């Protein structure tokens, strides 16, 4: 049996329209399952329950999404992803708990490497820069270097100024 688009039963099965923003589901179950945003300009938030909320990012926003889980015996999984929220119609990479997905700039697993990424973010903040404004190429560089077990170049004010000039030219 088919339903007309005007049939109320068919209408209830249609998913709600997207807001045009990237949504990230954050979960916090103390010492078991923790999802958090390390940096990013949150444009909206919906509280689902005491342990779950959904945050939204506008297109082109950069954000770092950290996931960690543990059992009685220690850490099971740790991961950090740095993504750029995509615009409608752009290609994207799917990522767990991120809807629809994003441009994946960095994806690192394993607590020692995740800690290193968190230290890189801290170092950027220490020199007075906002990680949300860092050149996407720097996060790609960090991903490649960390994946290969190599040292990541520091993100300096000079690199940032070069990025801002390039960005102003529309590149």
Image: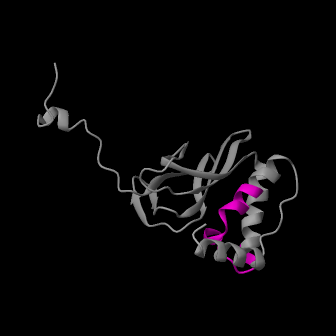
Residue at the (62%, 45%) spot, across then down: 32
* Quarter location, residue 2: top left
**Looking at the image, is 154 positioned above or below residue 80?**
below
Residue furthest top in the image: 1
| Residue 135 appears in the figure | yes
| Residue 85 x/y as whole percent | 51, 57
Screen quadrant of the N terminus: top left
Screen quadrant of the C terminus: bottom right
Which sits in the foreground, 39 or 49?
39
Which sits in the foreground, 155 or 99?
155
Q: Is residue 30 left or right of residue 53?
A: right
| Residue 36 x/y as whole percent | 58, 57
Q: Is residue 3 left or right of residue 150?
A: left
Residue at the (45%, 60%) spot, across then down: 56
| Residue 122 x/y as whole percent | 74, 69
Q: Which color mode does the image show?
A: one colour
Predominant secondary structure, magenta span: helix
Q: How many marks?
A: 0
Q: Is residue 138 left or right of residue 150?
A: left
| Residue 124 x/y as whole percent | 73, 72
The segment highlighted magenta reads 125-141
**Looking at the image, is 155 positioned above or below residue 141?**
below
Which sits in the foreground, 134 or 163?
163
| Residue 112 appears in the figure | no
Q: Is residue 151 magenta?
A: no
Q: Is residue 127 magenta?
A: yes
């Amino acid at each position: 049996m088919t339903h007309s688009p005007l049939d109320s039963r068919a209408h209830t099965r249609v998913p709600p329209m997207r807001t045009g923003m990237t949504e990230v589901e954050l979960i916090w179950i103390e010492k078991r399952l923790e999802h958090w945003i390390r940096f990013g300009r949150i444009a909206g938030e919906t509280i689902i329950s005491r342990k779950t909320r959904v945050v939204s990012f506008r297109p082109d926003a950069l954000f770092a999404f950290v996931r960690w889980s543990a059992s009685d015996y220690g850490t099971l999984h740790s991961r950090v992803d740095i993504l750029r929220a995509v615009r409608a119609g752009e290609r994207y990479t799917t990522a767990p708990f991120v809807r629809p997905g994003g441009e994946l700039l960095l994806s690192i697993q394993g607590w020692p490497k995740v800690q290193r990424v968190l230290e890189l973010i801290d170092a950027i903040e220490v020199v007075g820069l906002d990680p949300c404004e860092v050149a996407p190429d720097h996060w790609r560089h960090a991903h490649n270097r960390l994946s290969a077990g190599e040292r990541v170049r520091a993100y300096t004010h000079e690199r940032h100024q070069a990025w801002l000039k390039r960005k102003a030219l529309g590149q």
